[in-house]
Amino acid sequence: MNTMLAGRLRLDTRTFAVEEVPIPVPGPGEVLVEVRAAGVCLSDIHLIDGSLSPFFPTDAVTKAGAVTLGHEVAGVVHTLGPDVKGDWTPGQRVVLQAGEACGDCPGCLRRMMCHRPLTRGLDYDGGWAQYTIAREHTLLPIPDGLPFDQAAIIPDAVSTPYAAIVGTGAVRPAQSVGIWGAGGLGAHAVRLARMVGAAPILAIDPLPSARERALLFGADVALDPLAPGFAEAVREATAGRGLDVAFDFAGVGAARAQAASTLGPFGSLVLAGLTPEPVAIADSIGFCFNVQQIRGHYGSEPEHVEQLVGLAAAGRIDLGPSVSAHVPLAEAADAVARLEKKIGDPIRLVLTP
């Protein structure tokens, strides 16, 4: 068999389809991975609708005018390319980092500190396919007890809020936290904020089902951002002080403005959701007087994924409830529609080749 199925996005027309394409051949330092699970993320939807475009597309993507989507991927090692230095063996269970460094700086394996970070399924072909290529330093072994579907969603759905909370937001025990958007990222943010000792944890989402889920995941309070008494409810929940850290996981301008208005003295707003909308501060004098901050956030570092694999393997976080459904790769377009329309209010849909 020389061909495989892959979910391909044409970048000129923004048309998506599952197509039959050649199985890629690993080059020097690369590994061919047989995909067992691949998460469907809201950023995949943004790629298809045109609100997100490749930041630094590789020559292969530019030449083809298309990219295979999917940055949340787990599978098994299939074939090693030449000059692979690690002890990788066929059949070994692995999860793939969601991106990598550009490679311009000798010895640099860090992605977030790179001046041209490349994202899998965006700048180069991803894992909505039966097979995918990965540079060996982007592979991380996973234990037998961690299911492929749970491992696959760690490199973004879990690691992005984890990095936002422990890194960018620097949340400490007993700090009050607000989480706007309790979907794929925000639902995990609630659980992770509880894990690091935040209190109280406020989950803000217009969907009743999302608010109910947030409470099950550990939120102390779940609020409708459109409710007339919203501001008063935040003040009551925080004993009048306001939030220490507010997180926008919704990627909505109105949510960011509302989150900024709830900050207490020395509070920080962390922008983890992606949107081209501008950031607006209604009361800039009050913002400065209270020494508040806005911090941008994007993705996670390789060590965050490694830490989360260890935490999941140790039973510190159960990712089973995060997998809303499994969808065959051939029906990837249906999974996209279900996520875009919030059918069933999924946390993560996982494609299975």
Image (cartoon, rainbow, N blue to C red):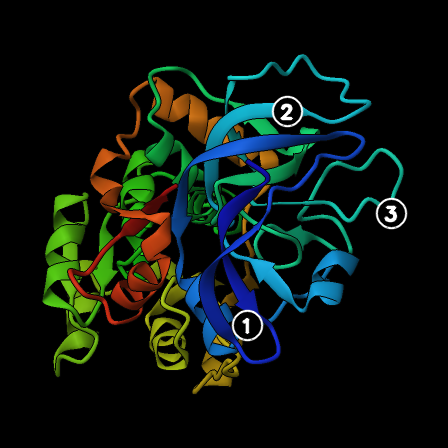
Position of residue 161 in the picture relative to residue 104 (left or right)? left
Task: Please name the residue shown 64% across and 24% down the image.
Answer: 79
Image coordinates of residue 291 in percent, x first then y, are 52, 67
Residue type at mark 3: give it.
Asp
Distance from disc 1 to disc 2, alpha carbons, whole Å, reads: 32 Å
Contact (Cβ within 8 Å) of mark 1 with mark 3 = no
- Residue 116: tell me if it is visible: yes
Residue at the spot of label 3: 104
Q: Crowdedness of circle 2 by 10 Å Cα count: few (<14), some, many (20+)?
A: some
Badge 1: residue crowd in 10 Å (few <14, some 14–19, many ≥20): some
Point out which mark residue 52 bears: 1
Q: Decide if residue 115 is on the left or right side of residue 279.
A: right
Q: In front here: 260 or 152?
A: 152
Say if 210 sits above or below 326 in the image: below
- The reply to whether discs 3 and 2 touch (Cβ–Cβ < 8 Å) is no
Q: Nearer the viewer, mark 1 or mark 2?
A: 2
Marks 3 and 2 sit apart, C-alpha to C-alpha, by: 26 Å
Q: Position of residue 213 (x, y in %)?
A: 14, 52
Occupied quadrant, residue 62: bottom right
Q: Identify the disc placed on residue 243.
A: none
Instruction: Give the residue at mark 2.
Output: 79
Is 221 placed above or below 72 here? below
SS at mark 2 in the image = strand
Q: How crowded is mark 3: few (under 14 residues within 10 Å), some or many (20 or more)?
A: few
Callout 2, which amino acid? Thr
Q: Which amino acid does label 1 sit on?
A: Leu
